[in-house]
Amino acid sequence: MTDRSLHTTCAYCGVGCGVEIPRAGDRDIQVSGLANHPANLGRLCVKGTHLGEVLPLQQRLLRPQLAGKTVSWDTALDFISQKIDRARTDFGSDSLGFYLSGQLLTEDYYVANKLAKGFLGTANLDTNSRLCMSSAVAAYQQSLGEDAVPGCYEDLEQADLVILVGSNLAWAHPVLFQRLQAARKTRPQMRLVVIDPRATDTSRAADLHLPLKPGTDGRLFNGALAWLADQNALDAEFIKQHTEQFDETLAAARQHAGSNWAALADDCDLSLADLLQFFDWLKDTPRTVTAWSMGINQSRSGVAKSQAIINLHLATGRIGKVGATPFSITGQPNAMGGREVGGLANQLASHRGFTQADCDAVARFWEAPNMARTPGLKAVDLFKAAARGEIKVLWIMATNPLASLPDANRVREALARVETVIVSDVVTDNDTLAYADLVLPALAWGEKDGTVTNSERCLSRQRGFLLPPGEARPDWWALTQVGQRLGFRAAFDYDSAADIFVEHAALSAFEPAPNRQFNLQPLKNLTAREYDNLAPMQWPFEADGCPRARLFSDGCFATPNGRARFIPVAPAEPDAAAGQLRLNTGRLRDQWHTMTRTGLVNRLGQHRPDFCITLHPADAAERGLTAGQPVRISNALGHFVALLAIDTGQRRGDAFAPMHWNATFAAEGGVTRVIPAIVDPQSGQPEAKHALIDVEPLPVRCSGIYIGEHLPEPLAQSAIWFKRSLGQQWLWSLFYAEQKVTELASLWQSIAPENSVTLSDSGHHWFHQASLPGQSPGFWLALGDQYRPEVDTDWLIEHWQVSDVALDDWLAGKPGKADPRGNLICTCYSVYDRDIQGYLEQHPGARLADVQHELKCSTQCGSCLEEVTGLVQQCSLRSSAVETA
Ligand SMILES: Nc1nc2c(c(=O)[nH]1)N[C@H]1C(S)=C(S)[C@@H](COP(=O)(O)OP(=O)(O)OC[C@H]3O[C@@H](n4cnc5c(=O)[nH]c(N)nc54)[C@H](O)[C@@H]3O)O[C@H]1N2
Ligand SMILES: Nc1nc2c(c(=O)[nH]1)N[C@H]1C(S)=C(S)[C@@H](COP(=O)(O)OP(=O)(O)OC[C@H]3O[C@@H](n4cnc5c(=O)[nH]c(N)nc54)[C@H](O)[C@@H]3O)O[C@H]1N2
Ligand code: SF4
Ligand SMILES: [Mo]
């Protein structure tokens, strides 16, 4: 650390990369990867690289607001306490609800849990991790005895076979993916298998991609177990010494998968050759890591599928060893910390459940007067109870449920029904904030202080390096103030995050169960200074206090008898689609969830600027759809509108749309409006990846682009719009079903600022008008009678406010030479696909390293490495085809 630099942890994904901040106190910063952080060793992905741009104050929530009016914290906190008090008296403790997030710090989470479960007497406290990790959690608990991820990142580097199931690691956990790719370079014997119904940047890097029928993973893994048993390729000694229930489990797997491998391949819609290749590699590779994520968890049988994966690892003894482990990859920066403090409604702090003994132990430690003794409502059920009017006060913190829970239209009705909705957030605008009675301004990344735990159980500090803006306060602080007002002064008398952390560590070491892995004993006496300087470290700790990278290496599991449990499973599959398409939803490389932060950064919008739904070309053709046109996606629950994209990497019958857009960024909302609230019966995790939908063209008479600060009423009325941040201004894409260009142009003219300049054609097919650069308020408008006005958006964004381009080009919104650069590939160095293709055309035989050297693309954060590699490969294939011909 240089004198003024500061070390912290990235705000985004569960890889948990260390970040170096050059100067404390400065909002305009260029962050870099922390060289000695064990998660990233100096690397950062594109989201991490742009962390500094997410800090501007324009859209920051700065003061508490009650019914839309600014109030003092005192008024706000009194209001909450009175509402909670009244609801408890009139309707009982279970009329209260807390909905938290894996983006809170461990300290925030700990205090919320203590308040609800220990002092208010309700376990109606759940978290968005329910939508994310809860299936893996339940599987670990049942199979291994504790919610404890057995492996570590190094295992992905040391394995000879890495299987990624339902994970788009290249986009969702880019730094981990880079570590994997770097290891493959140095250890060419390593193989990568990717199991995902659609082609992704991750699958394109694989030795074998299994584009299976969605939802058939359980059958595939059961088949693998049965096949390995037939081949006598299981670890009989490990099974005998360290596990139980093997025979029942193998019998169930055989029954589910059958023994006709051709039929199994058919059921999964795979070729028999690919299926057997996968099984063969499994048989021959003791060092196997199976890493899974949302393609497994977000399903009606996410727990059973996770168990089918764990069963396979137990049966081959591939757990707790170097390069051999089942490994669920967590999504959010502190999903793991949340699990450690009991953030789920069916857990108590420190990996405890709701047994009498656990409840008593926690109650004793907290000296809790109103200990909750039964599990509370899981996320989807909590909002269903709210819709029935049973929840009177709901406190939502660091999550945007109206945009991320399934069946958004019902979630909206639920929020409208709750008497008091409190939302703690850091931005002024998101879908959920619109339904808040009371809004509380929280400290954001860079301002807040505490700890997070990443996917490999590594605990690191997020450190504040900026002064709190306005009246924003830590989330934990707001909770403690309410606790104190409700009469629990001593229990919530914390001065700092450090105070809370040591209590959390002490509770983890209090009356520990014999085989429980989670125990922060060595950290329970940290001084404030030691906490401030805490270096990243993995739990659990050896007797001498040294961190341990792998769990269960001695074959002793966290169950009461120390044996791992095989679980017989036959995972249910999603409903069949009769004439409908199946909607798969997930992530893009440069956006984070509901876009409240990444959606404000121009550069992060460049990689995939539009909200698109992707179909196979044949499905699009069958419906008479062409790329770029707006389409209406619907089912009985609701509808949303997106633009059509076409990709042969999409299976026939399947569609994919990103989860990111919502009512804040698109007039007709996002994907969750059509996702049914079907949940896994054990974990309560919603099936977010298999909704059945219809897709039809949206009639469009006229479309437009508008750049400005606000969308003026004549244009907004009756428009279907999507908006994208340009920093101070927004760019709206507009579509109109009824009006013609001339009608809209004349409506607009009635309010157009003076001195605007116009360009239009005599046939009234298009109309462009803009304020001259430097004029205020600035705007730029194009209307046209096709799906998109013919402008080069990237060029326009760069030039609409500068006066050094020809007026006609500027008004036309494209360069005279008509030289659009295509799609942005490398956000760090602004390199477009046409730049790369142009270079490759001029330099036949150029290799990836030449392109990187010349254009610099993929040399900074590396997030685009797969795409650049793909372009180089395409080009060399094309030239060898030409040579062969
Ligand atoms: N850029 C970016 N990164 C993120 C996030 C973000 O918002 N943006 N969010 C973070 C969070 S919280 C999470 S949980 C993680 C999620 O990380 P991932 O789980 O890797 O991401 P997803 O895109 O949700 O889904 C992964 C893949 O599952 C596939 N899939 C769908 N159905 C099936 C199926 O039936 N079987 C199989 N085998 N695969 C299927 C999808 O096609 C998709 O490619 O990402 C984290 N990282
Ligand atoms: N269809 C579909 N739905 C999904 C998924 C999917 O793949 N498909 N994925 C699911 C998954 S895995 C996840 S994790 C969820 C994510 O869904 P959400 O948690 O709803 O998404 P975010 O946009 O991350 O919401 C975080 C909110 O917290 C605010 N915030 C940020 N930092 C702080 C802070 O320090 N304090 C406070 N109080 N607020 C803060 C942000 O501005 C934002 O409004 O979505 C789930 N929903
Ligand atoms: S991989 Fe990217 S988003 Fe995830 S923690 Fe690292 S820098 Fe942040
Ligand atoms: Mo997640």
Image (cartoon, rainbow, N blue to C red):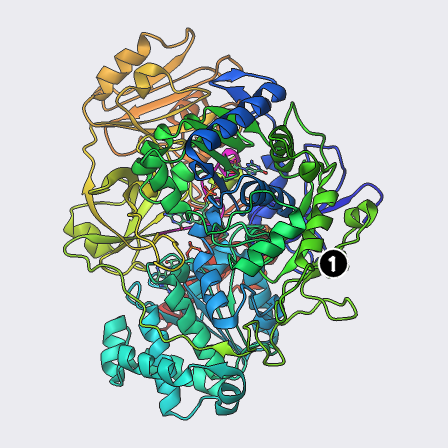
* Left or right, residue 244 beside residue 389: right
List x then y, in percent, for residue 753.
41, 9
Whether residue 868 can be seen here: no
Observer-nearest of 502 and 534? 502
Where does label 1 land, which residue?
Answer: 36
478 with respect to 730 (left or right): right
Q: Quadrant of residue 561?
A: bottom right
* Label 1 lies in ligand 3 vicinity (Cβ under 8 Å): no
Looking at the image, which residue is at 26% across and 12% down?
A: 746
Taking the image as shown, residue 498 lies to the left or right of residue 127, namely right
Which is more toward the observer, 802 or 629?
A: 629
Place of residue 397 in the rendered image (x, y in percent of width and height, measured from the top left): 52, 37
Magenta highlight range = 585-601
What residue is at 21 percent from the left and 31 percent from the top? Answer: 700
Q: Main secondary structure of the magenta part?
A: loop
Residue 589 included in the magenta stretch of the image: yes
